[in-house]
Amino acid sequence: MMPQLNEWYKSAKREGWTLSAVSLDTDLGKLKNTADELAPDIPVYSDFEGWKGPAAVSYNVNATPALFVLDKNLTIIGKPNRLPNP
């Protein structure tokens, strides 16, 4: 899904959308390789704590990728299970 998300983002950002990825990787090298290969246009963040990190726990992530739509106040307003058409 990440390559498709990357393609969606390239067109959606022209319409004002912002996208960030939060990785559950615990290894910087693996994170960089995966991000560069699958979604080079999407900024990626990680606390390198994996499934037990605050992001995974706070957002109740139990599978990846997990998609969340946030408003300008960072409140979750949607949890889509597929990508919208840009």
Image (spheres, grey):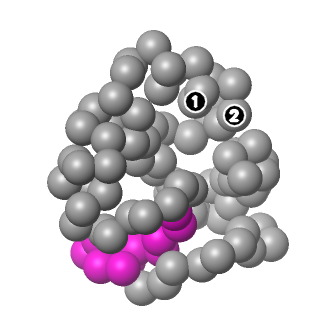
Q: Which residues are magenta?
A: 66-76
The span from disc 1 to disc 2 (Cα, nearest Å) is 5 Å
- Outermost residue, top direction? 29
Dots 1, 2 in contact, CB < 8 A: yes
Q: Position of residue 5 (x, y in %)?
A: 70, 53
Q: In this image, 5 relative to 75: left or right?
A: right
Q: Residue at x 22, y 66 (%)?
A: 58
Is residue 61 on the magenta stretch? Answer: no
Nearer-the-camera pick, 10 or 56:
56
Q: Residue at x 57, y 63 (%)?
A: 16
Can residue 54 be seen here? The reply is yes
Nearer-the-camera pick, 23 or 51:
51
Residue linked to disc 2: 38
Can residue 10 be seen here? The reply is no
- Outermost residue, left direction? 54
Relative height, residue 85 to residue 38 (above, below): below
Q: Residue at x 42, y 85 (%)?
A: 77
The three-letter code of the residue at mark 2 reads Leu
Q: Few, some or many C-alpha atoms within 10 Å of disc 1 (few <14, some 14-19, many ≥20)?
A: some
| Quadrant of the rendered image containing residue 47 | top left
Q: Position of residue 2 (x, y in %)?
A: 68, 47
Residue linked to disc 1: 35
Q: Few, some or many C-alpha atoms within 10 Å of disc 2 (few <14, some 14-19, many ≥20)?
A: some
**Helix, strand or loop status at disc 2:** helix
| Quadrant of the rendered image containing residue 29 | top left
Q: Position of residue 81 (x, y in %)?
A: 64, 76
The three-letter code of the residue at mark 1 reads Ala
